[in-house]
Image: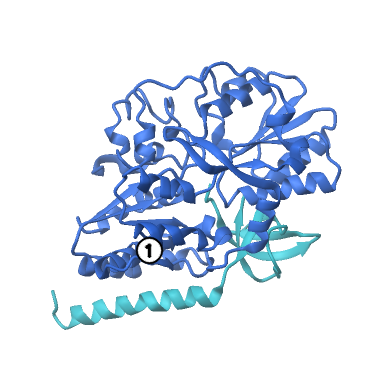
Amino acid sequence: MCLGVPGKVVSIENDIAKVSIGGVMYNAALALADTVEPGQYVLVHAGFVLEVIDREEAEETLNTLREYTNLYTELEIGGER
Amino acid sequence: MRFVDEFRDRDLIAALSRRIRDVSRSPITLMEVCGSHTLAVQKFGLPSLLPDTVNLISGPGCPVCVTDVRFIDRACALSERDEVIIASFGDMLRVPGSRTTLEAQRAAGRDIRIVYSTLEALKIAKENPERSVVFLGIGFETTTPTCAAAVLAAEAQGVTNFSVQSAHKLMKPAMTGLIDDGVPINGYICPGHVSIVTGTQIYREITERYNVGCVVTGFEPVDVLQGVAMLVEQHERGEPQVEIAYRRLVTHEGNRKAWDTMLEVFEPCDSNWRGIGVIPESGLALRERFAAFDADRAFEVDSGPPVEPQGCLCGEVLKGLRKPNDCPLFGTACTPRKPVGACMVSSEGSCAIYHKHAGEQVA
């Protein structure tokens, strides 16, 4: 049941967040999450917000992985393999 | 979609595939223990992007698949009572019990409702005060806190007609149990969303005592390949470690609030994993304080003797010892439309996933 999906918090009322997932609005309870604010991206699972997505970590991960892309592009340009 | 599309980038996928090929020299067997990982691996065709040295196997990460047949039999028997409403996640409905299924019971007119959230089940209880709602609680550490939250809400709101029949389970005892059982595993692709809740603490023993690497991995193709790359690199260096690849959502500490909520309501107990057997301290049962919300205590049920299907290899498949297409029933007697074993029913079951996605390229 790891069916968590990322979405964007649009509004919050009474411990329930309205989250936009692929353009469709879903309700997600905040009972299991610490502070959540509108505008944040969160992981929603079985009707609950489980965690806020750390955008800096996401960028860092992508940047680290892009170094491999650059490395292999350079190797190919240099005629390797 | 944000935080999805970037992790499906073809250039990154190609670069990671290349990286793994470059680094991997010695054979390595990696097990994932999450139905969503099984799905991601097959759906995105990842085995074809990996060198022959890397063997990906699937473990018991499908909570529906490992639920004891008696759990289903009990739920079906309970559904016979007019005052009971069974509330369940969708994919439990078609799992074969000893004699029938929840879907068949529903077709025969019993009140069985699919819910997407435990809070929906609680709402049904509040809207039907003269009936008794029994929520079928399955799932690991990702889902159990949501069940705990509903029980706490029921207690706080004075709801007396809501109970949980728990088959919730913990991931780690199965992960160590498989190694103890001799399943050859060099590294674990650790479940990304379970780990949001648990953090990495639960994997320390696996690495320290068994020398098996653990990398917490997400579910998009870039995520899975990144996790594989990290495990391969650990293996080549001879340094198994606990690492997080899925850093945008997982921390070493985990979500303490979700974890504490889960343990406020549930405590570990021995649990029978369908196809595998009893794993000590691997299940979660409601604590004494919540006895009023425990369907097992609240209802006296005779569900008859448990019966398992003949020839079904689900047990071996769940332990990663056989692939779905090794099973004599796969694709013939057992198909998604007419499943024999649980692994063919659930959207997270290995056999259902293979049947849909692996097609001609099964290895």
Q: Residue, x 43% and y 57% (percent of image)?
A: B190
Q: Which chain is blue?
A: B
In the rendered view, tell whether residue B2 sits above or below residue B339. Answer: below
Residue at mark 1: chain: B
Q: Residue, x 68% and y 62% (percent of image)?
A: A33
Does dot 1 land on a helix, a strand or a loop? helix
Q: Which chain is cyan?
A: A
* Residue denoted by label 1: B227
In the rendered view, tell whether residue A36 sits above or below residue A5. Answer: below
Q: Residue furthest front?
A: B209
Residue B171 place in picture, x, y as percent: 50, 49
Residue B323 or residue A74, whichever sits in front: B323
Image quarter hosting the C terminus of chain B: top left
Residue B69 seen: yes
Q: Residue, x 63% and y 57% (percent of image)?
A: B259
- Callout 1 amino acid: Gly
Q: Quick check: B289 left or right of B305?
A: right
